[in-house]
Amino acid sequence: MPAADPQTRDAGLVRALGVPGLAANIVNTTIGAGIFVLPASVAVLMGAAAPLAFVACAAAMGLMVTSFALAGSRVSVTGGIFGYAESAFGRYFGFIAGALLFINACLGVSSVGSAFTGFVGKLFPIMASQTAKMLLLLAVFALLAFINIRGVKSGARAVGTVTIAKLIPIFIFIGAGLFFIQPELIAWPGWPGTKPLGESVLLLVFAFSGIEIALAPSGEVKNPSRTVPRAIFTALVTTTLLYIGIQFVAQGVLGPDMPQHKDAPLAEAASRFLGTAGGLLILIGAIISAFGFITSDMLSSPRTIYALSRDGIIPQVVARVHPRFRTPYVAIITYAVVTYLLAFSSTFEQLVVLSNVTLLLLFLLGCSSAFVLMRRDVRTAGEPLTFPGAMAVPILACVVILWILSHATAKELGLSAAYLALVSALYFFRRNSARPSTDSAG
């Protein structure tokens, strides 16, 4: 049976997100707690040539996000890449995309939630106990679930507010730090070599990731054929400039000492040119950034569960829309509970290793979907985005993704294959078990 038209499937939702709200959501999702340790990790591989890795990764991500923009301008159904894959390849591949998106979202927000409680524990020692951390995270997830149930506008306003708050310490770090950069510490050291560059790009792809989550509420975006591309490119440029600025300041202040402060390079750099107050500022910034990531994720990721339920892949009760606020409240509550429990699961560390490969597989599916949607000239959201040579972009993106995947370990590939086998078995079990009732009803 063919899937319903995207506009019909999301008829119960309100299209309230514009370019500023969606772009803020993408920036907020992309710039998470990892930005406060990222410069040292890249410097270990690249030294003073680290900014080159950011440029190279931004170019690679540019191909991927352009592919997502091309797909998003043609398919506006809630679910992001899940919706693109379903429209291009059918329900099974849509389900696989949703499963990949879901596991990455859960792993990401759970790990950031743990980091958030750790940051708070360092700032307030009374919150360092395991019980205090559990209660704190429970309060955070409950509050954000409540805000998003009240409406996507409320969720978007919360995202926009937190995005501004989390960027202020970063702007101060860059603005003040520029005056303390030692030119000899950022002098170009020469070509670093293909291997360290490739390893750095592999690392940074995930630092730039987040768009695949932030595009999930496409069914609640105003004029998606224009809003989605503009929001994506605005967010990518903003994120790239911020990352490069942070790297220049951290490298220019710490130089070869940066690898010695791998856990908190920004805090160390800030303490050198702003004193103790600088280190405190960065710690507060890390708390805000982690909280901002969770805020943005709670706006976007529950819509993936809603999309899976809406299409009958998981129990349809999850797709219920609140009669007053017109939001997928059951999906929001379900996601909040699952991620909260996962944050303290004893098996969480074993699941984290899945994130790298599964994210790249998700990107590969999204870029492939863009090519198919363009070839078929699918149009569900007005005039789609197009430009000369657009058909080549998803192809190039797929080649880049496959090259990055070639650096994955056998363990990562094996665990990812096991996860895909498990969710595939679930999909076909539900499909086969639903047939008798469908046939008898006919």
Image (cartoon, helix red, strand yellow):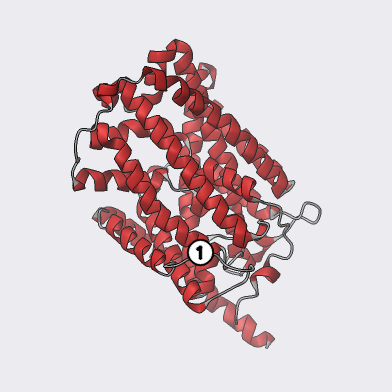
Give above or below for 263 relative to 405. above
The answer, for residue 42, to whether it is visible in the render is yes
Q: Quadrant of residue 288?
A: top right
Q: Position of residue 398 (x, y in %)?
A: 35, 63
Side (left or right) of 97 relative to 1: left
Look at label 1 and name its amino acid: Leu
Q: Quadrant of residue 317?
A: bottom right
The answer, for residue 98, to whether it is visible in the render is no
Q: Position of residue 44 (x, y in %)?
A: 25, 33
Side (left or right) of 93 relative to 137: left
Residue at 62 percent of width and 40 percent of height: 159
Quarter the C terminus occupies: bottom right
* Label 1 crowd bin: few (<14), some (14–19), many (20+), radius 10 Å: many
Residue farthest toward the front in the current orientation of the protein? 388
Q: Position of residue 332 (x, y in %)?
A: 64, 50
**Disc 1 element:** helix
Return the residue at label 1: 70
Q: Nearer the viewer, residue 302 or 26?
A: 26
Residue at 38 percent of width and 60 percent of height: 361
Residue farthest toward the right in the current orientation of the protein? 324
Q: Position of residue 89 (x, y in %)?
A: 48, 74
